[in-house]
Image: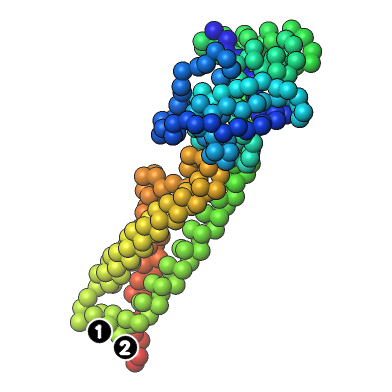
Amino acid sequence: MPACFIPSMLLPLLFALQAAAAPALPPAGIDSVPPAASVRGIAIDERFATDFGLRLGDEFTVSAQPGDAGDRVRVEAITRRTADPSELARSEYRVRLHLSHLQGLLGYGDRVDRFAVAAPDTAAAERALTQINESAFGFRAYRSREIAVETSSTFAVVSRFHDAIGVITIVASAIFLLCIMLLRVEERRRDVGAMRLIGVSRASVVRAVVFEASLIALFGAAIGVGVGWVAATLVNAHYQAVYRTPLVFAFVTPGIVTLAVSLSVVLGIGAGFLAAWRLARTPPLALMGR
């Protein structure tokens, strides 16, 4: 069955607040009280209620233009915002009214700015899309995923920017790890030279250095995962408080941990092998400084 949605945030509403005794806001996602016959009931978002000190049962006047008499309304529901990236940068307050109430308040007649139609399946949605777009000029129907793509374009750019930073960080860390292994191997030239003189093979030297490099890489990966988890927790706590949204801004998933550890081990083995092979090719006497 078609569902109609009117974005009330696009409407210039004037609110004259009047405090009234009411119970405290319960912790539920959507709270409600029994409607009253004398005034119309509306729903407001939690941020609106917090900023203006409104609670369930409070009454105030809502009008389409400043100075208009308006209608007396009562807060019958307080809703919490969803984790929608498209609403992140919006500082408006969200108010939901019954459609008939909204029409009468605005004197808008049988017109709407936007409405949403729910289809039972993809085929029905495609047919409805074609019929609506071919019926008349002046309006256009869009799929919900197309609107989501348009509203999330900024986040797509940020995601690509983060990918570029990740690639640069991986390359830089690989070079840094190789330098560390080269320095550690150079510090053990005499030890490796003595091992070669007593009969330890080149392969054994390479395996020992590669094993040490792998342990260093695993230790570094563990520290990196811990730092990433702490940083993600702090980022989420800060920005969720700033924007007052349940949206998760940073997270550490098992996939990310697996990728980080795998890259760390591969880079560690590669750096250790290069450093060890460079040392193993040097004659033992040269390693001893002779």
Residue 24: image location, x then y, percent: 44, 34
Residue 49: image location, x then y, percent: 54, 35
Of all residues, the one furthest to the left in this rendering is 198
User: Camera-side residue: 207 or 106?
Assistant: 106
Task: Find out whether the residues at labels 2 and 1 contact each other: C-beta distance under 8 Å.
Answer: yes
Of all residues, the one furthest to the bottom in this rendering is 290
Residue at x 34% of width, y 59% of height: 222
The quadrant of the rendering that contains the N terminus is top right
Q: Hey, which quadrant is residue 182 in on the image? A: bottom left
Q: Hey, which quadrant is residue 183 in on the image? A: bottom left
Residue 25: image location, x then y, percent: 45, 33
User: Camera-side residue: 98 or 138?
Assistant: 98
Residue 112: image location, x then y, percent: 71, 16
Whether residue 210 is visible to the viewer of this picture, yes or no, is: no
Nearer the N terminus, badge 2 or badge 1?
1
Residue at x 66% of width, y 32% of height: 16
Q: What is the distance, in whole Å, between disc 2 and disc 1 at their CAs?
A: 7 Å
Q: How many marks?
A: 2
Q: Amino acid under label 1?
A: Ala
Give the vertical position of 191 relative to 267 (above or below).
below
In the image, taking residue 95 as reference, residue 223 lies left or right, namely left
User: Camera-side residue: 171 or 169?
Assistant: 169
Give the vertical position of 148 relative to 41 (above or below).
below
Q: Secondary structure at mark 2?
A: loop
Q: Which residue is mark 2?
A: 288
Whether residue 189 is visible to the viewer of this picture, yes or no, is: yes
**What is the number of the mark on residue 194?**
1
Q: Amino acid under label 2?
A: Met
In the image, taking residue 75 as reference, residue 180 lies left or right, namely left
The quadrant of the rendering that contains the C terminus is bottom left
